[in-house]
């Protein structure tokens, strides 16, 4: 298990747990990052942060800082 | 008459639907959070008038940003007769998350599946009956853009008006349901409206709810103690969010029939292909810079694509020159072709100039009423009209960027860089809007969820030269020329200087803020689409209308007042006097003492600059306009020129923008903002005049001071980065 900020572009992962507190954790839930959700890591911004992911059929961007709060399990390795 | 509220996710097409229904031209953008305040209109195609309220887009009824609070409070407190939940059919899973919360409220709900045409085009199908059965409320497919099924939607909503709908929940877990029910009964006993909604929010630990019903919190905690979930433990927030999404995926899979080829999420859509280029690891930033450059180039340059500078293109054909310059052929060749912005501005100048000549041709010279019409009204009109073309050009580009979905990518691309200054990528949009007008820019800051960052951004807005300051830069162009500075370089330096200062100020604020905390950045990236002509035009028209109303009222009144003050003496019996004997001159002379240290208020005509600056409080257009109206003959040296420009750029904006800031900030923060605007502009101006004068007196002294200042800035930056590292270590 690792956190979302460590995931590599192209990987497909499953959300296991979301840490953090209050508003921001709540926001992550509201945006669909609930345990069990499938994430496809799409790309990293030109300056190395934030990351773009596909979740529940749409594109979401979040910083690695926030990605640290999301524990994931790799389902599919990145295809090189 | 009944009242219907439109609620839905940001970017779900609510505003487009609102425009289609009401025929209004509210501004729509492909950028989450375009509607920052509610908007009202009415639908008149049924037997009874229906008032429609467009609410800011929300992802959830547990608000995160101030604009989300507006939506929640409206639905709960203002009690609309029916809520139309606008759902983006192409993104149904996340959109229905809000629906599950709306259903908990005791209000009739109609679900409008918007962008149904796009779903059909992609070959997918949504089973409306199935969805409607599962949700327990009517569902209808519409296309707000193509006016599809809108009348049916309104009829459906209208027929729901007397429904006594009770809130329903999608929670299926028996134990949890039991808990929610107990809290609901407690609420019902207190006669709280929407007991189910409040009960669930309280169980979810919703911030607002806990504050509102603190008396019940202990009771709920008591209930919660008896509850243990295998996976989530006592994490009710996660539990309920999960329950909602689970419910959706369960029912959504049976109602949504995806086209077979689309199952694979790694397959590239057209939007993805565009995105690959625009957010490319290497090309993204150069492309962004190029787009920004083009935007300003096409609006302001007099030498399109530098065809004169690089290829020596010059035009000496009389007809062609008259065409490009708006009949200003003087026998000299024209260097290069003007940009569309300048071209339109030239013709606007021709139109207003002709009008003035026409009035002069038949009105008796030397009378007060000729002076009133020509020097007052028409000169005012000329100044106002002359830069409508350029403002419109800038707004046009911004509307295209916004509508296409690129704006959101700009935030994505720039976030990392902005973070260095203690801001997030979201700050970019308000700042960019600042180039158009400070009022919408300050309001757009509402999409920033963090209070501190929002206050910061509002204070920085004046660094971005708004459209109304353009006539001032144009007027000052003549002074720049006198100092051997090309006018377009001067204007460019002002814009660039403004941006640079914003960065420095942001760093400055970061340096002096107690914690180094940066607010999170969690944002949806909408799919790209071709800008809709109707949306872009609606956006432009809204801006133009806003501007024209402002011009016709406040600017016109101020123009007349200034004309009066500058034409007459305290002793009215003297009739029309020279401006140097006027009331305005006296007022300006008195107040000039404040601005004396800044350089430009010195000299016999210094008070005129003071007067111009003061009138800027009414509307910034007046600063540039009055430069012409007051007939300034004095010159400014480079130090005075930049000091004056910078003061007017940074200082307190017009009353309208001050009002916007008042509306967006707490009273305390608002006063701080006003003070910041004044002292920051005064300080910057003082510095520029001081250092600039040194250069003019003795080059070596100027260089010495500049080196000292640069070292100071580097030193400050060093301290910031050290402090930052320490803060980061603490986090880890």
Image (spheres, helix red, strand yellow):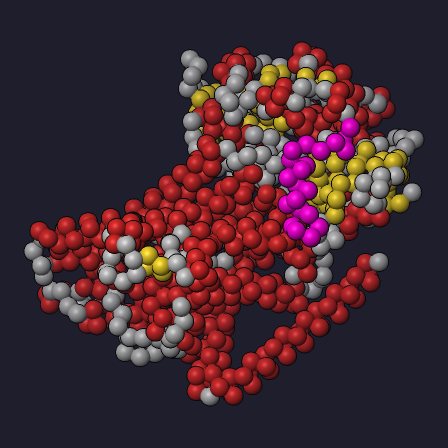
Which residue sits at x=43%, y=36%?
Answer: B537
Q: Which quadrant would residue B102 be assigned to in this image?
A: top right
Please tell me whether residue B179 is drawn above or below residue B471 in the rendered image. Answer: above
Please tell me whether residue A51 is drawn above or below residue B267 in the rendered image. Answer: below
Please provide percent x and percent y for residue B15: 52, 31
Q: Is residue B66 or residue B175 the one in the foreground?
A: B66
Please provide percent x and percent y for residue B691: 49, 80
Please tell me whether residue B701 is drawn above or below residue B679 in the rendered image. Answer: below
Which residue sits at x=58%, y=29%?
Answer: B7
Which residue sits at x=14%, y=50%?
Answer: B358
* In the displayed structure image, the side of residue B669 where residue B199 appears, left or right: right
Residue B271 belongs to the span the image colors magenta: yes
Q: Which quadrant would residue B251 be assigned to in this image?
A: top right
How many numbered marks appear? 0
Q: Is the N terminus of chain B in the top left, top right, bottom left or bottom right quadrant?
A: top left
Q: Is residue B145 or residue B247 the one in the foreground?
A: B145
Please provide percent x and percent y for residue B605: 28, 75
Please provide percent x and percent y for residue B622: 33, 58
Which residue sits at x=67%, y=19%?
Answer: B123
Q: Is residue B590 visible?
A: no
* In the displayed structure image, the side of residue B45 where residue B255 appears, left or right: right
* In the displayed structure image, the side of residue B246 where residue B474 appears, left or right: left
Q: Is the C terminus of chain B in the top left, top right, bottom left or bottom right quadrant?
A: bottom right
Please tell me whether residue B550 is drawn above or below residue B470 in the rendered image. Answer: above
Q: Is residue B50 or residue B204 the one in the foreground?
A: B50
Stretch of the chain drawn in magenta: B264-284
* In the displayed structure image, the side of residue B41 where residue B410 appears, left or right: right
Q: Is residue B144 visible?
A: yes
Residue B610 belongs to the span the image colors magenta: no
């Amino acid at each position: 298990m690792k956190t979302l900020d460590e995931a590599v572009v192209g990987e497909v992962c499953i959300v296991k747990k979301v840490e953090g507190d209050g508003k921001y954790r709540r926001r992550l839930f509201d945006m669909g990052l609930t345990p069990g959700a499938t994430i496809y890591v799409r790309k990293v911004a030109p300056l190395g942060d934030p990351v773009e992911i596909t979740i529940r059929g749409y594109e979401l961007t979040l910083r690695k800082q926030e990605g640290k709060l999301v524990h994931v399990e790799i389902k599919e390795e990145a295809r090189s | 008459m009944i009242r219907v509220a439109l609620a839905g996710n940001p970017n779900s097409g609510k505003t487009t639907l609102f425009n289609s229904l009401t025929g209004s031209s509210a501004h729509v953008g492909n950028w989450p959070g375009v509607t920052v305040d509610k908007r009202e209109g009415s639908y008149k195609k049924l037997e009874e008038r229906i008032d429609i309220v467009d609410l800011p887009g929300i992802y959830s009824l547990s608000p995160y940003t101030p604009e989300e609070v507006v939506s929640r409070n409206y639905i709960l407190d203002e009690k609309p007769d029916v809520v139309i939940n606008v759902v983006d059919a192409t993104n149904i899973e996340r959109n229905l998350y809000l629906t599950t919360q709306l259903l908990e409220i005791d209000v009739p709900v109609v679900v409008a599946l918007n962008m149904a045409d796009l779903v059909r085009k992609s070959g997918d199908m949504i089973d409306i009956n199935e969805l409607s059965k599962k949700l327990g409320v009517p569902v209808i497919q519409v296309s707000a853009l193509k006016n599809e099924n809108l009348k049916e939607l309104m009829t459906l909503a209208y027929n729901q008006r007397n429904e006594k709908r009770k809130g329903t929940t999608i929670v299926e877990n028996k134990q949890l349901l039991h808990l929610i029910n107990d809290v609901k009964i407690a609420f019902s006993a207190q006669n709280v409206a929407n007991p189910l909604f409040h009960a669930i929010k309280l169980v979810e630990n919703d911030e607002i709810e806990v504050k509102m019903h603190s008396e019940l919190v202990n009771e709920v905690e008591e209930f919660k103690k008896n509850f243990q979930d295998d996976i989530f433990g006592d994490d009710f927030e996660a539990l309920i969010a999960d329950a909602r999404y689970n419910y959706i995926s369960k029912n959504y899979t049976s109602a949504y029939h995806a086209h077979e080829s689309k199952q694979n999420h790694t397959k590239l859509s057209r939007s993805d292909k565009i995105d690959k280029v625009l957010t490319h690891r290497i090309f993204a930033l150069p492309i962004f810079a190029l787009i920004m450059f083009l935007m300003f180039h096409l609006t302001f340059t007099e030498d399109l694509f530098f065809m004169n500078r690089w290829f020596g293109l010059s035009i000496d054909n009389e007809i062609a020159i008259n065409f490009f310059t708006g009949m200003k052929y003087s026998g000299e060749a024209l260097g290069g072709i003007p940009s569309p912005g300048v071209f339109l501005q030239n013709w606007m100048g021709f139109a207003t100039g002709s009008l003035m000549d026409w009035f002069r041709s038949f009105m008796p010279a030397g009378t007060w009423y000729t002076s009133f019409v020509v020097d007052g009204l028409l000169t005012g009109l000329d100044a106002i009209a002359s830069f409508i073309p350029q403002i419109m050009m800038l707004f046009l580009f911004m509307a295209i960027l916004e509508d296409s979905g690129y704006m959101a990518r700009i935030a994505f691309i720039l976030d990392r860089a902005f973070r260095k200054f203690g801001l997030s990528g979201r700050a970019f949009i308000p700042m960019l809007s600042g180039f158009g007008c400070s009022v919408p820019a300050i309001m757009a800051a509402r999409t920033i969820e963090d209070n501190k960052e929002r206050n910061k951004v509002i204070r920085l807005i004046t660094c971005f030269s708004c459209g109304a300051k353009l006539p001032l830069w144009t007027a000052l162009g003549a002074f720049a020329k006198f100092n051997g500075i090309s006018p377009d370089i001067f204007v460019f330096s002002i814009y660039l200087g403004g941006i640079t200062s914003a960065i420095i100020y942001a760093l400055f604020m970061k340096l002096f803020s107690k914690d180094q905390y940066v607010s999170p950045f969690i944002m949806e990236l909408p799919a790209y689409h071709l800008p809709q002509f109707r949306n872009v035009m609606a956006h432009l028209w809204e801006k133009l209308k806003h501007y024209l109303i402002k011009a016709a009222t406040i600017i016109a009144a101020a123009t007349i007042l200034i004309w009066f003050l500058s034409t007459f003496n305290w002793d009215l019996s003297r009739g029309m006097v020279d401006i140097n004997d006027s009331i305005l001159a006296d007022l300006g002379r008195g107040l000039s003492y404040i601005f004396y240290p800044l350089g430009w208020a010195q000299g016999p005509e210094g008070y005129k600059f003071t007067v111009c600056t003061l009138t800027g409080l009414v509307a910034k257009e007046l600063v540039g306009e009055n430069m012409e109206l007051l007939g300034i003959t004095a010159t400014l040296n480079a130090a005075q020129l930049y000091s004056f420009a910078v003061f007017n750029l940074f200082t307190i904006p017009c009353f309208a923008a001050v009002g916007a800031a008042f509306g967006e900030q707490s009273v305390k923060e608002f006063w701080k903002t006003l003070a910041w605007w004044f002292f920051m502009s005064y300080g910057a101006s003082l510095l520029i005049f001081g250092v600039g004068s040194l250069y003019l007196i003795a080059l070596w002294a100027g260089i010495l001071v500049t080196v000292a200042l640069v070292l100071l800035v580097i030193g400050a930056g060093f301290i910031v980065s050290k402090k930052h590292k320490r803060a980061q270590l603490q986090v880890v």
